[in-house]
Image (tube, rainbow, N blue to C red):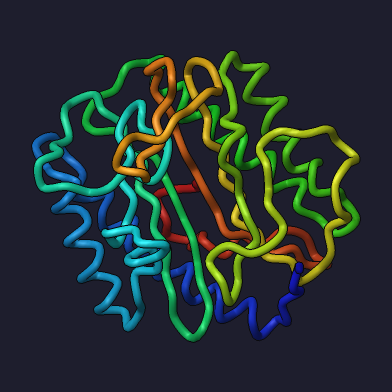
């Protein structure tokens, strides 16, 4: 069931999302070669708690950590570890979920570790632009798959592929709500978008093929062909005035 949020509820979600922004801004400043993903998780958990919030991922369906850290060929849901170090030229996707005031916020960015290859820079740029294009279709009267098609068509035109096994989602009083938001689909299809919907739109883009698999830890999703993958996500409210990106602040260094 899809629940439409009131302006007051959207503001509660926005407050969660702004903590997610601050958390990722802080983490981005300490991402460097030699840092472990376990250290990033430890810092994030403390930071979130200092803002009077709860790391939404910790314990969610048994997930053991407070953030997701996915490196290179890892697409999503990577488990932080003190034995996993970042190396020069890596990319690391950091996904942060926040719970506060009875609502959730969700944000993910992919961060370069030092200098990265030009081809990797293009992957990140294309994934961010695909997110922009998807968000631009998050408007009253459009269809759900207009968002999906905007993402897919741009990504594939640029020579990359979208992950099909994992999707975006509604968000509010639950971390994952209806509707699911695929990153592929036919324009003009799907439910009609209405004011009050809040969606976590999150392109997952692979340099190679779209196929993925889950590792034996039952969480970490990787590309089947070993190609690198990028992941960017925003929480977006659909309003009569257009899409409002709740996971964005005026002084943020990240658009997505």
Image point (81%, 68%), residue name: 195
Q: Is residue 81 left or right of residue 137?
A: left
Image point (77%, 60%), residue name: 242
Asked if residue 88 is positioned above or below residue 119 in the image, the reply reads below
Q: Tag count in the figure?
A: 0
Q: Quadrant of residue 49?
A: bottom left
Asked if residue 21 shows in the view, the reply is no
Indicate the position of residue 45 as horizontal and vertical percent values: 24, 67
Indicate the position of residue 127 as horizontal and vertical percent values: 53, 32
Asked if residue 103 is positioned above or below residue 61 in the image, the reply reads below
Image point (49%, 24%), residue name: 206
Q: Quadrant of residue 188?
A: top right
Asked if residue 242 is positioned above or below residue 121 in the image, the reply reads below
Q: Quadrant of the N terminus?
A: bottom right
Q: Is residue 121 left or right of residue 180?
A: left
Q: Is residue 159 left or right of residue 255?
A: right
Indicate the position of residue 209 as horizontal and vertical percent values: 53, 17
Indicate the position of residue 201 as horizontal and vertical percent values: 61, 50
Asked if residue 248 shows in the view, the reply is yes
Q: Is residue 115 left or right of residue 22?
A: left
Image point (56%, 74%), residue name: 13
Residue toward you, 208 or 88: 208
């Amino acid at each position: 069931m899809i629940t439409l949020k009131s302006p007051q509820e959207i503001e509660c979600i926005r407050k969660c999302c702004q903590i997610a922004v601050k958390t990722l801004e802080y983490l981005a400043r300490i991402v460097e070669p030699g840092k472990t993903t376990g250290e990033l998780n430890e810092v994030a958990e403390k930071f979130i708690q200092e803002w009077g919030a709860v790391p939404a991922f910790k314990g969610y369906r048994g997930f053991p950590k407070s953030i997701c850290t996915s490196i290179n060929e890892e697409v999503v849901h990577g488990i932080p570890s003190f034995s996993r170090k970042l190396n020069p030229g890596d990319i690391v996707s950091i996904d942060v979920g926040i719970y506060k005031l009875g609502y959730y916020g969700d944000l993910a960015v992919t961060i370069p570790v030092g200098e990265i290859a030009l081809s990797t820079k293009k992957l990140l740029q294309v994934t961010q632009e695909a997110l922009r294009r998807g968000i631009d279709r998050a408007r009253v009267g459009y269809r759900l798959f207009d968002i999906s098609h905007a993402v897919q068509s741009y990504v594939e035109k640029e020579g990359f592929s979208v992950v099909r096994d994992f999707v975006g989602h509604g968000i509010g009083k639950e971390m994952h709500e209806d509707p699911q938001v695929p990153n592929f689909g036919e324009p003009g299809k799907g439910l009609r978008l209405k004011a009050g919907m809040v969606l976590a739109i999150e392109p997952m883009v692979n340099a190679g093929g779209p196929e993925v698999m889950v590792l034996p830890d039952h969480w970490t999703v990787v590309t089947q062909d070993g190609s690198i993958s990028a992941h960017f996500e925003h929480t977006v409210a659909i309003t009569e005035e257009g899409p409002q990106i709740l996971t964005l602040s005026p002084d943020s260094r990240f658009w997505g």
